[in-house]
Amino acid sequence: MSEPETEKEKEEKLEAQLRESARAGLRFLLIQRRSQPGCKGWELKRELGRNYLQILRLVNGMASDIGLKLVSVPDEDFPDDPDRSRYLLVSKEPLSEKDTGSWLRMEEAASLAIILSHLFVKGEVDSKAVVMTMVREKLPSWRAQQVVSKLTRLGYLEDDAGYIRVGWRTKVEIDRDELLTSILSRRPEGGDPANPST
Amino acid sequence: MPKDRKSKNAGIEYRERIAALSEELKETGADPFAVDVDHILEELRKDYAVSDPRILTADAKALGSVSEVVQMQDTWIGKQLSGLQVDPALLLDRVKRLGLRSLAASLYSSQHLPVGVKQVATKRLLEAAEYWIQLSGWGGRLSLPSNQMGELLTETLELTPEDLEQEVKDMSESVLQSVAEGPVAYDALLGQSTGAERLKRAFVLSLICARGAVTLRYDPLLGKYVVQRAEGTPDSSVAIKV
């Protein structure tokens, strides 16, 4: 006859099960199945069970060990429903230009910085005309049009009947506070070298 | 009584405008504090004693909208308190004074790229191998028939920026109409034109593609390029014989 399990053994067994579930969750999140990265909460629920939100905390710890972090993007129509949120892994630290290659060209990245800095202080939406005027101050009109169109197609922006909104990809990739702090702390070209704040 | 009816209609119209206010704020992202809630409530209170069902219905809708505005004000304060406090004027000034390189560096330094592993199915690998085998090798010279070459060399193609813009506009409409129901062969869009006219159409089509409205895709079944509506991530450019 086998000995009954002690409390300690039960705990160890549960811990091993949770760790295995977390590993499965990490694998599930890492493998990209569709054009959009990550997966929806309901997919994780089906894969990991009803307590998937608890398991995701462990997944985040495991991801952190390899320089990644877990982020969730709430669904626009149901922001409070975790099952409809999108979960995905992103790099913990910003990657250098060398690492990323040329996903966004300099002009495109600069234009996105201009647009986002404006949208972030305007409640994440403004008219397309205003946004285009801002970009045209830095780029020729035809190029500004091209860049905004590309950023919209990539999902960084959303063109909604004459209004530009922050797109899903921006919510995933761009850290609002880091972007605004970086812009405000940079010294403008030709500024006073004695006063870095100008 | 016409005077009564007039004022009643004005009251309903006012309530309808208030009812549409919350949706308008959501769409435009305007500052919810720009709405004078106290004044609206005061106006609505004036007809409190009226028992006309039309006024009462409009009243309920207007009050629903006002409560949504108040909720938006609350959310706005929450966001301001939880996030970084930034002076919009200072930020705008800094953006104006920074160069493209600095702005791009700011974006890169705040970007956390998604990470994912993609897998290629064996079937797709076989398809790719078959496609690779049927490609002609690098360095093979593509020669044009002598008469066509002569035609291209002797004809002059001149386009002013205004003409070009008009050409792009005109051709955009016809191309978008053509691809509305599905991909269309690239050659079919160039039509029967030859020489400079053909080259001009190809050039204008390349500009339309660059603007992102349509894109080119190689169809291995047809063995030729087709033009279709652009979807997803932008494509890379491709050299094509016209």
Image: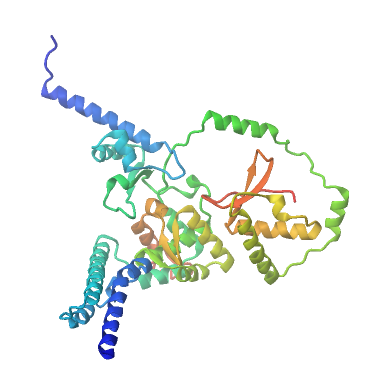
**Given the current orientation, which residue lies at the most extreme front position?**
B1
Q: Residue A180 occupies which quadrant of the picture?
A: bottom left
Residue at image position (78%, 57%) is: B193
Tell me: residue B3, above or below residue B112: below
Of B4 and A140, which appears nearest the observer? B4
Report if residue A184 is visible in the image: no
A193 left or right of B211? left
Tell me: residue B228, above or below residue B98: above
Residue B25 point in image, percent of width and height:
33, 69
A56 left or right of A184? left
Residue at image position (37%, 35%) is: A28
Tell me: residue B165, above or below residue B237: below
Q: Describe the colour scheme in one phrase.
A: rainbow
Q: Residue B94 occupies which quadrant of the picture?
A: bottom left
B96 left or right of A171? right
Residue B196 point in image, percent of width and height:
79, 60
B195 left or right of A97? right
Residue B195 point in image, percent of width and height:
81, 57
Of B95 and A29, which appears nearest the observer? A29
Residue at image position (66%, 62%) is: B171
Report if residue B147 is visible in the image: yes
Q: What is the count of numbered marks?
A: 0
Residue at image position (34%, 55%) is: A76
Of B235 and B189, which appears nearest the observer? B189
Residue A90 point in image, percent of width and height:
38, 45
Of A169 and A66, which appears nearest the observer? A169
Image quarter (top left, top right, bottom left or bottom right) of the N terminus of chain B: bottom left
